[in-house]
Amino acid sequence: MKIIVGLGNPGKQYEATRHNIGFHVIDELSKRLDIPLTQSKFNGMYGIGHVGTEKVMLLKPLTYMNLSGECIVPMMDYYEVNDDEIVVIYDDLDLQVGKLRLRQKGSAGGHNGIKSIIQHLGSQEFNRIRIGVDRPKNGMKVPDYVLSNFSEDEKIEMIHAVKNSANACEDWVTKKFLDVMNTYNGA
């Protein structure tokens, strides 16, 4: 089984925020793959289906961003999924709006959701799809910025980024992550 995780915060007030871009990718995949998120376990909403012969789980941790590892790692343990059989999708301040960067390992880079996963997993070696949201302008504080909505112009870029991220996830189900990285990095 492969687990595709989108990071975000639960609740209507966070739905359209920068921090919830991972949830948007999971929603896109849910529609495309006809895998409804109707199950709940370890404080996460998920659905399980198939892409070809591969079993796939789509997962949204409902722990709030900073505690994402509290959902993901117990889910991995329960379903006996290895570190290289997950991909985590999240927002990144160090990338231009809408740009993708795929990596197989690395530090949290200041992202509290990734810090939580690393802490609970005990490893920095797991697949990631980072989606650029850029840095705040005009002195806005980072927590306020990531919990703000995209501008109208940015929304267009993010629709493209969500589709590209979903494409990358679909490709990863049947290909090596390194090959997917070569195709989508910088997209």
Image (cartoon, rainbow, N blue to C red):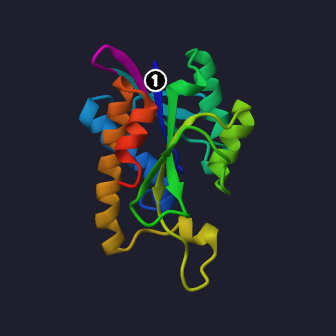
Instruction: Please determine whether, in this image, residue 13 is positioned above or below residue 182.
Output: below
Left or right of 156: which side holds 73?
Answer: right
Instruction: Please determine whether, in this image, residue 144 is positioned above or below residue 176.
Output: below
Q: In which quadrant of the rendered view does residue 177 lie?
A: top left
For the point 72% across and 34% down, the residue is 120
Q: Residue furthest bottom?
A: 138
Q: In which quadrant of the rendered view does residue 145 lie?
A: bottom right
Question: Which of the pair 115/179 is nearer the observer?
Answer: 179
Point out residue 138 in the picture as x, y percentages from the top left corner: 56, 86
For the point 32% across and 48% down, the residue is 164
Q: What element carries label 1?
A: strand
Boundaries of the magenta span = 50-57
Residue 19 visible at all: yes
Which kind of residue does numbered mark 1 sit on? Lys
Point out residue 165 in the picture as x, y percentages from the top left corner: 37, 46
Q: Name the residue under label 1.
A: 2
Q: In which quadrant of the rendered view does residue 109 lie?
A: bottom right
